[in-house]
Amino acid sequence: MKRLLLLLMAILLPLANFAQIKYESLSSQKLGETRQIKIQLPRNYEENLEKRYPVVVVLDGDYLFEPVAGMVDYYSYWEDAPEMIVVGINQDGIRTKDTYYSEQNFLPEGKGAKFFEFIGMELLAQLDQKYRTANFRIIVGHDFTSNFINYYLLKQNPIFQGYINLSPDLAPQMADRITSALNTAESRKWYYMATASSDIPNLKEDILSFDNKLKGLENEMIAYTFDNFEDATHYSLVGKAIPSAIQSMFEIYRPISTKDYNEKLLQTSVSPSEFLAKKYTSIEELYGIKKKISLNDFMAVYKAIEKTRNWEEYKNLYKMAHDHYPGTMLGTFFEARYEEETGNPKRAMRIYQNAYGQEKIAFLDSDFMLEKADAIKKDFGY
């Protein structure tokens, strides 16, 4: 296990060093003590003053924080997940007290109830006051702490939308309670759970039984993902599960894939420009993030329009390009292509010429745009 964690750290820490890591002491009235937390702020947090970020709360922060923070930074670097504020709560030596539950009703009791309130009523409130947080929160736990994170899902209006369960040590009745909560949920939730071939036997048995219950979920508001990793243990599964969980929770956030391009954008029944607009509207609605349309996604839609020859799609596309990349040649090029293919070559020629002096982007530069204008001039004798 130590070798695996060292390898994971060697891969991820060089990336995480670009992000801002802070260590803070948080005084808690609920707990009657001061707790140590680690915070990773996104790259360029101080420069992007208008931007807000989802929050990831990591229990067992003494050993889970670095793997989670590193993978969040890695995936956000490649735009496969949003930049996020990652907060680790150190629980070394006190995790069993923090996660204590009643032997009668199997709900948090004593120190466990106080820790539950500390996260929900103090930690998150202070983060919201101090940092630019978005209204999307994820919580992560491992065995005892994984069971604990599920108590938030039992509340009428859960404060977390995403739950990453790493080999949960489930309390009695927890599987039935969570199944019921997910079946009746009225808002979007992402639920991830993982075990492994060499996980602790009694935990694995309960997890597999729980998975069988969750496979029958029919609630469209719930996105459930389960992994049973081969050749992994109770501890090494963490390194495999974290990236899998991030991918599953932010599938729609990722750039348009080859699969989406082939199966959706190339279908004549699909409007590529509407697909693009809905993708980014969904990102804002689901994660509370207003994301700029990526150049990759504009290029995917552009190629689909050229392939299907659905020229009317350029009309919406060039308007979006002008909004998201003002001052560049992107919107100008799409507008010129629209005019060129819908019977207005003279207007297209002038639009290509007007690109001179605009900022180049992707494969578009002044030479390319003027060559397009000259080609029309030659073909039509203008």
Image: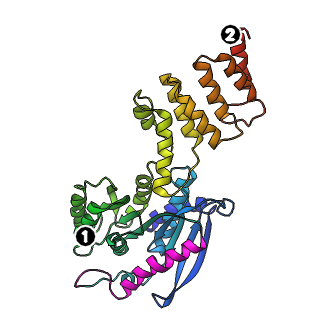
Work out which quarter of the rendered image holds the N terminus and state it: bottom left
Mark 2 or mark 1, earlier in chain: 1
Tell me what residue is drawn at x 28 percent, y 66 percent. 181
Q: Main secondary structure of the magenta part?
A: helix
- Is residue 177 a member of the stretch shown in magenta? no
Tell me what residue is drawn at x 37 percent, y 60 percent. 189
Q: Secondary structure at mark 1?
A: helix
Q: Position of residue 148 (x, y in %)?
A: 35, 75
Q: From this viewpoint, is residue 91 visible?
A: no
Q: Position of residue 224 (x, y in %)?
A: 32, 56
Residue at which label 2 appears: 379
User: In the visual, does 122 lie left or right of 202?
Assistant: right
Instruction: Using the numbered discs, state the Cα–Cα distance from disc 2 to disc 1 in whole angstroms.
Output: 71 Å
User: In the visual, does 247 lie left or right of 87?
Assistant: left
Q: Amino acid at mark 1?
A: Arg
Mark 1 neighbour density, 10 Å: few (under 14) some (14–19) many (20 or more): some
Q: Secondary structure at mark 2?
A: helix
Q: From this viewpoint, is residue 360 visible?
A: yes
* Residue sitting farthest toward the right: 357
Give the colour scheme shown: rainbow
As rendered, which of 112 and 155 lies closer to the eye?
155
Residues at circles 2 and 1 in contact by the CB criterion of under 8 Å: no
As rendered, which of 247 and 151 lies closer to the eye?
151
Q: Quadrant of residue 372?
A: top right
User: In the visual, does 162 lie left or right of 382?
Assistant: left
Whether 293 is drawn above or below 364: the answer is: below
Whether 165 is drawn above or below 304: the answer is: below
The number of numbered discs placed on residues in the rendered structure image is 2
Q: Position of residue 64 (x, y in %)?
A: 46, 69
Provide the residue span drawn in magenta.
Answer: 103-131
Residue at which label 1 appears: 177
